[in-house]
């Protein structure tokens, strides 16, 4: 296995695992590539923070049924458990459009880096947010393991001394990236990768925006109302 870690000229960090070249027909062949990039300033995150805390109360009041917390352990009273009911990219908030643009830019960059430039697809994403209050954490979970599996993302809006740990899908705890949650930083990760979050030790809620990206092949399996089109990848190199 080869560890990847490289910084691009614009400060974007690429990290992950790549299989050593297979020497038999049955040896594993994979690239699990992560991308970390700062996309919002501290001031913009403070605006998001205030806005999302208000939205949390509105969502919990409007949608009173939990649809499951995605095995995060956050429970049926969490805004995470309402994630199929809304998409943050549709919120009437002045930074939502900027988030959509950055998400599309970053996934295009990943497709280019991984030499997938001949692939042409319209891309969609779900987008929710998580609020972890003092003592709360996220248990290890993964977002997808099916034939539409693509990329997931996390954007840290507010966090103090928490980490997201990403685990190699086979080598588990033995191989992991423990990534400090930094305000304004977006992480894109292959959606099959197991990950968890350390407990929030502070009174200030830890807030992140998250989502799952898909190609159009996800339809008609997914509900269109939760998926927002972010753009069409058409060899933009
Ligand atoms: Fe997750």
Image: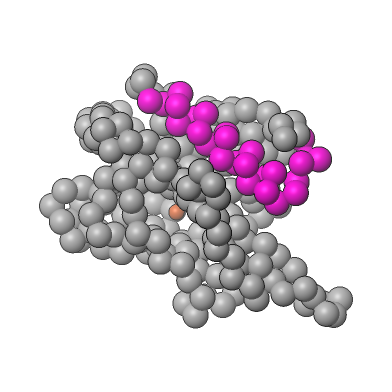
Q: Is residue 115 above or below residue 169?
A: above
Q: Residue at x 45, y 31 (%)?
A: 99
Q: Residue at x 68, y 45 (%)?
A: 111
- Name the foreground residue: 188 vs 144: 188
Quadrant into which the C terminus falls: top right
Q: Quadrant of residue 218?
A: top right
Q: Which residues, given as a range, are shown in magenta?
A: 95-121
> Is residue 219 shown to the viewer in this render?
no
Residue 19 at what x, y percent from top left? 69, 71
Ligand 1 rendered quadrant = bottom left
Q: Residue at x 27, y 45 (%)?
A: 158
Residue 56 at what x, y percent from top left? 27, 35
Residue 181 at what x, y percent from top left? 34, 54
Count of numbered marks: 0
Q: Quadrant of residue 5?
A: bottom right
Q: Is residue 164 above or below residue 68?
A: below
- Name the foreground residue: 178 vs 82: 178
Quadrant into which the N terminus falls: bottom right
Q: Relative to 54, is 114 on the left or the right?
A: right
């Amino acid at each position: 296995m080869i560890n990847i870690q490289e910084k691009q000229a614009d400060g974007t960090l690429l990290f992950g695992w790549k299989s050593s070249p297979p020497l038999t027909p049955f040896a594993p062949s994979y690239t699990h590539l992560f991308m970390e990039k700062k996309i919002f300033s501290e001031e913009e995150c403070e605006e998001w923070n205030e806005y999302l805390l208000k939205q949390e109360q509105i969502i919990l009041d409007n949608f009173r049924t939990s649809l499951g917390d995605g095995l995060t352990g956050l429970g049926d009273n969490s805004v995470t458990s309402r994630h199929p009911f809304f998409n943050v990219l549709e919120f009437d908030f002045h930074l939502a459009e900027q988030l959509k643009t950055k998400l599309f830019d970053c996934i295009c960059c990943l497709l280019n880096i991984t030499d997938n430039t001949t692939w042409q697809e319209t891309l969609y994403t779900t987008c929710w947010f998580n609020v972890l209050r003092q003592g709360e954490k996220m248990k290890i979970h993964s977002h997808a393991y099916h034939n539409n599996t693509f990329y997931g993302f996390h954007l840290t809006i507010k966090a103090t001394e928490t980490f997201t740990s990403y685990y190699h899908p086979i080598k588990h705890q033995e191989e992991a990236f423990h990534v400090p949650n930094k305000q304004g930083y977006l992480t894109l990760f292959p959606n099959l990768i197991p990950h968890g979050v350390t407990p929030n030790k502070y009174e200030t809620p830890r807030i992140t925006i998250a989502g799952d990206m898909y190609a159009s092949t996800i339809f008609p399996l997914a509900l269109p109302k939760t998926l927002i089109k972010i753009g069409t990848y058409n060899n933009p190199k």
